[in-house]
Image: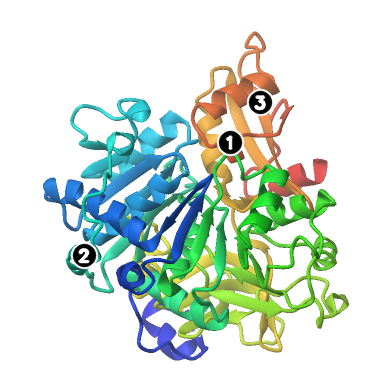
Amino acid sequence: MQLEASLLASTLTHSGGVKNMQLVSTSLAESCIRHSEHDAIYCNDETISYHQLAVRVEHVCKLIRDKQLLGQRVLIHLPKSLDYVVAIYAVLATGNSYVPVDASQPQERAKLILEQAKPALVITENSLVGSYTDEATPTLAMDTITYGEAGLEQEALECAIASWHRPNENDIAAILFTSGSTGTPKGVQISHEMLSHFIDWAVTDLELSSKDVFSNHASYAFDLSTFDLFASCRVGAAVWIITKEQQHDVSALLEGIERYKISIWYSVPTVLSMLVSSGEFNSQRTKPLRHIIFAGESYPIGALRKLCECLPPHCQLSNWYGPTETNVCFAYRFCPAGTDLEHFSTLPIGRPLPGLRAAIIDDQGMELNDTGAQGELLIEGAGVTPGYSNIIDPRNSKHHRNRCHATGDIVHCEQGLYYFHGRSDDMVKVNGHRVELGEIEASLGQMPGIKDVAVIAQLGEQQQKLIAYIVRSDDLQKINLLTVKQFVSQRLPRYMVPHAVRFLASLPVNANGKVDRKYLRNEV
C-alpha cells in the first residue's frame, strides 16, 4: 500500500532512540558558568572566554528585551564575525528565533528573504541599515554597541544568565532559507527538538569534550554551522570562526588549524580537496585533528583516498548526510588507518541516527522492501522540520505535520548501509550549497532578451559547474556570459551564478513535452 506519513512509525526502519534530550539553548548558559574561564571563541586576532561571551550576550539580550520581543523572528544580517555569534545566542536567550542571512548575499535576495521572514527585528550593522530595509523595520546595529566592563562580576552575571529563556522543545530556534524552485527561497523551520536531537547524538558519537577545538567554516545561513556553534557550547569547547575572507584562503586555513590546534573539522568536501591540492596539508600539520567530518555533497573515493594520505593514523572521518529539513540524519564513520576504501566504489551515507526512521519508496509512494532496490528516501522522527515558514509544499506539508520528510534523494540499502544515487528532481548541491535550478531559471527569465532558459549542473570530482542554456528573444540584445553573470549576481548568491552560457535556437523537449535535461547534460 502507499505510505502515508501517519503510518510511518509502524512501517519505517527504526534505529534506536535518544533519551534525556538537553535543549541546546540551555547549553550556553551552563557552559558560561561551568567553563567561565575557558576559551569560547577565536576570531581573527581576538579570543574571548565563556565569561566574556556571556557578558556580550547579556548586553544584547537587554537591547532585545527593551523591544519586548518574545517568540518572534529576528533576522541577522552581518558579516561572518564574533558579533554574528553573539547575536545568534542573544536571540535564542531571549526566546526568539534567528533568521540568518549571509552578508555576501545580493541585496535583492536579502530583501526577498526579509519579505518572506517578516521579522520583528533586524540585527545588522550601520553600513547595511537601509540597504534593503525600510523605516518600518526595527533594526539593531551591532557595531554601535559598546560592552564596557559592566556585569563582569561572576555572581551578577550568573543571575543574569539564570534569566535567559528556556524554550519548549517544539519552539522554533531558527529559520534557514534555502533555494526554492519557484524563485522564492524556502524558510525551513528548525525546532529546538531538531537541534537537540542532533547535538545530543554528535556529542556522544564523537566523544566531544571541553578539550576540543572546533572549526566553523560554514556560513551561519547554512545548516552545517549548527554543529559548530551548538556542539562546542554544549561541551564548553572553543570554536574558531573562519571569516569570509579566510574561507578559501588555503594559507589562512592551514595557519588556523595549527595556531588553534583544531581537533574537530567540519566542512563540505570541496574545501578539504582544496587543502589537499595545496600540497601543504600533511600529517604533521594535521596532527591536532582527531575527527574530520564532511557533508553537503558526495566525496569521490579517489579524492577521499588523497585526503586520508594527509592525515595522522588516529584521525577518524565521518560522512554526514541530510537535507536542511532533517539536518544530519545519516552518518558513516571510519578511520583512514584501518579502512580499505578499495571496498567502496561510492562511500555510503551510512545508517540513520538513533531515534530516526528511514524508508525507501518508488515514484508511486510504494515502499520498496527488496534488498538493493533504488528509490526515494523518506525520513521520520525528532530530527525532521515541523514545516516551512512561508510556503505550502504540495508534497511535504502533510508529511511535516507528522515529522516526516520526503527527501527527493534516490538511495539504496545494502547490508544496513545506505548509498546515495542522486536526485529525483532539479535540486543539486554545488560546493555543498543547496541549489534549485528553477530559482536560477526564474531569475534569468527576468533578463531582457531571454525568451527561454534551462540550467543544468555539471558535477565533477573536484568542482561543480552551472551551465545556462539560453534561447534569445531578440538577437539585438547583447547577451553573453559576462552580462548573464552581472544580471544574476545582483539577485542570487555567488554560488548560484552560472559558470558557462550556451545559446540554442530552442530548448530540447522529451516525450512529455518537458525540457530534456538529460539531453542537455549529455551535450556538456
- Residue 305, x across and y down, in percent: 84, 67
> Circles 1 and 3: CB distance less than 8 Å?
no
> Circles 3 and 2: CB distance less than 8 Å?
no
Tag 1's secondary structure? helix
Of residues 50 and 413, which is closer to you in this image?
A: 50
Residue for badge 2: 164
What residue appears at the point 54 percent right and 22 percent down from the top-left corner? Answer: 447
Which quadrant would the C terminus be assigned to in this image?
top right
How much space separates mark 2 and mark 1, taking CA atoms?
A: 37 Å
Tag 3's secondary structure? strand
Of residues 111 and 31, which is closer to you in this image?
A: 31
- Mark 1 vs 3, N-terminal side: 3
- Residue 359, x across and y down, in percent: 54, 80
Tag 2's secondary structure? loop
Is residue 179 positioned above or below 261 on the image?
above
Q: Which amino acid type is shown beneath numbered disc 1?
A: Arg
What residue appears at the point 58 percent right and 24 percent down from the top-left corner? Answer: 451
How much space separates mark 1 and mark 3, taking CA atoms?
A: 23 Å
> Circles 2 and 1: CB distance less than 8 Å?
no
Residue for badge 1: 494
Q: Nearer the viewer, mark 3 or mark 2?
A: 2
- Residue 73, x across and y down, in percent: 26, 51
Q: Can the viewer see residue 391? A: no
What residue appears at the point 33 percent right and 74 percent down from the top-left corner? Answer: 23
Residue for badge 3: 471
Residue 135's tag is none
Q: Nearer the viewer, mark 2 or mark 1?
A: 2
How much space separates mark 3 and mark 2, taking CA atoms?
A: 56 Å
Of residues 266 and 81, which is closer to you in this image?
A: 81
